Structure formats: structure tokens, C-alpha cells
Amino acid sequence: MADDETVNKIEADDGTTWVEIASVGTEDEASLLAGYLDSEDIPSQIENVKFTEAPTNFGAMGDIRIYVPEEHEARALELLKKREAEWETMDDDSGTVATDDGVAAIEDDAETENETETENKA
């Protein structure tokens, strides 16, 4: 998460102030967080400043930042904090899966996407 003392802000042409709320290391993680925020009706933007020519991440050149409009900052931070807390306390077993709605049980007779696709092609 972004530190309150060093929060990055971007002023858009339309007058919206975008505030950095998280910095992650992969595009996949950034997309997941942005999708989660979107599902909670919080607009977000991803700023990818990752330097891909080098074999490793170099500090700020490896950051992928997630921004939300300033008026959504508090709620977005609260949601991400709650999501992280739920993740940390979740039992790590094969009978559950983490979803944006919380922990869900996996049904014994559930089919995977690959099984469903194979059946549809047949």
C-alpha cells in the first residue's frame, strides 16, 4: 500500500485527482486489484512503469501502481485492507477458494472449465 507521507497523485485534464493506493510487482496482481475495485464501483487506473528490458526489478522501475480518484481513496484502502486481512486468516486447504465475496467451498462434484469446454466440443 502507498505510504500516506509519500502518496503519488496525478491531476487529470478533466480535473480528477488520482491517488496511488497500491504498488505491486506484477501486471496480473494489478489487474486483479483493479478488477476487485471495479466490482466495488470504484474506478481505478493502472500505471505500469516496469522496466522490462532488465532481468530483475529495480525499485521504482519495477512498480505497477494502482490509482483511484481522490474521493474514493479511503473506501478503496479500507476494502484492500479488509481483503488482505481475510486472505491472511483464510484456512489453506484444498476444499476452499478465495473469491471477492470471501471464502467459498468447492463442491465435490464441481466441474472445471476444461471439463465443461471438452463436453461442449463433443
Image (spheres, grey):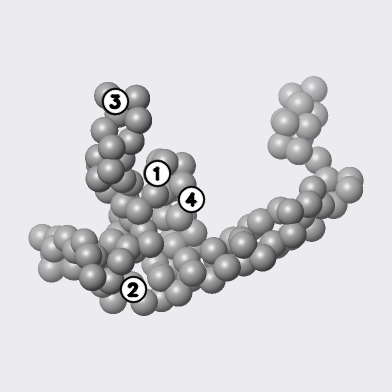
Q: CA distance from mark 2 to mark 1?
A: 23 Å
Estimate the x, y position of residue 56 in percent, counting from the top left.
Answer: 35, 30
Estimate the x, y position of residue 102 in percent, counting from the top left.
Answer: 65, 65
* Amino acid type, callout 3: Ala
Relative placement, left or right, of 33 versus 94 is: left
Please identify, in this view, whether the residue under mark 3 or under mark 2 is nearer the observer: 3
Q: CA distance from mark 3 to mark 1?
A: 14 Å
Estimate the x, y position of residue 29 in percent, counting from the top left.
Answer: 46, 47
Count of numbered marks: 4
Circle 3 residue = 54
Q: CA distance from mark 3 to mark 2?
A: 35 Å
Q: Residue, x 44% and y 62% (percent of image)? A: 37
Q: Residue, x 28% and y 71% (percent of image)? A: 4
Q: Relative to residue 27, is residue 4 depicted above or below?
A: below
Along the polypeptide, which appears first: circle 3 or circle 2?
3
Circle 2 residue = 72
Neighbourhood count class around disc 1 (C-alpha, 10 Å): few under 14, some 14–19, many 20 upward: some
Along the polypeptide, which appears first: circle 2 or circle 1?
1
Circle 4 residue = 32
Please identify, in this view, whether the residue under mark 4 or under mark 1 is nearer the observer: 1
Residue nearest the viewer, comparing 51 with 45? 51
* Amino acid type, callout 1: Gly
Q: Which mark is residue 76?
A: none
